[in-house]
Amino acid sequence: MVASMVGLVAAALVVALLVGASLGKGSASTGGPAGGPGVARADAAQAQQTLSTALEAVATAASGGGSLASVDTATLSAAEPALTFVSGPSTGPSTVSVASTPGGSGNVTLADRSTDGTCWLVWEASDAPVYYGAEPDQAACDAPALAAPPTPSAGIDWQQSSFPAG
């Protein structure tokens, strides 16, 4: 029994050393853990996932009120309490800026700032395809109220179907 315990402890030490060495190699090849390309991609993925979750909240909130025109920060917060929805700027990856445009069936723009400074955006209307956008190097990002489908403009790269490369 003692030999088994010593063997388990030795195996655990070997695994810990191997894992530590592997993690050290990964961060050295990306230029360090803070600010490496892998970290930037992870930050972008987190912000994009937040916006995908927020889009699900938009669908839930709109189904209760009948249209996107009824979607606001309160209905979104009720639909997805894990996120913070604000009418002002998004200053971090779990705070989603919301702007809606009433009239007709309405539309909603969502924005989320990743920690690398990229402002990720999503625009949805019931009668148009979903548009995704990115605007790099932002201290904060506000969701713009857009009455019509977005078009690429100064600084914001908009496209249909998926997020731009950013």
Image (cartoon, grey):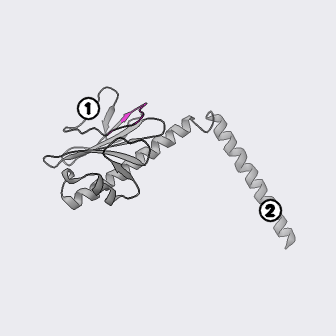
Instruction: Specify the amino acid type for callout 2.
Output: Val
Q: Which span of residues is magenta-colored?
A: 134-142
Main secondary structure type of the part rendered in magenta? loop
Q: Residue at x 26, y 51 (%)?
A: 72
Find residue 5 and report its horizontal and vertical position in percent.
Answer: 82, 68
Find residue 10 and report its horizontal and vertical position in percent.
Answer: 81, 59
> Label 1 belongs to which residue?
151
Extreme-bottom residue of the structure: 1
Q: Residue at x 76, y 59 (%)?
A: 12
For the N terminus, give its image quadrant. Answer: bottom right
Q: Residue at x 31, y 36 (%)?
A: 159
Q: Secondary structure at mark 2?
A: helix
Q: Foreground residue, 75 or 38? A: 75
Quadrant in the picture for residue 57: bottom left
Q: Are marks 2 and 1 in contact (CB under 8 Å)?
A: no
Q: How far apart are the two marked residues, 2 and 1, measured between alpha carbons?
A: 60 Å
Extreme-top residue of the structure: 154
Find residue 117 and report its horizontal and vertical position in percent.
Answer: 45, 35
> Label 2 belongs to which residue?
9
Using the image, tell me which numbered label, if any, was put on residue 160: none
Instruction: Specify the amino acid type for callout 1.
Output: Thr
Find residue 96 and report its horizontal and vertical position in percent.
Answer: 36, 47
Does residue 26 lie above or below 6 as drawn?
Answer: above
Would residue 116 appear left or right of 127 to someone viewing this image?
right
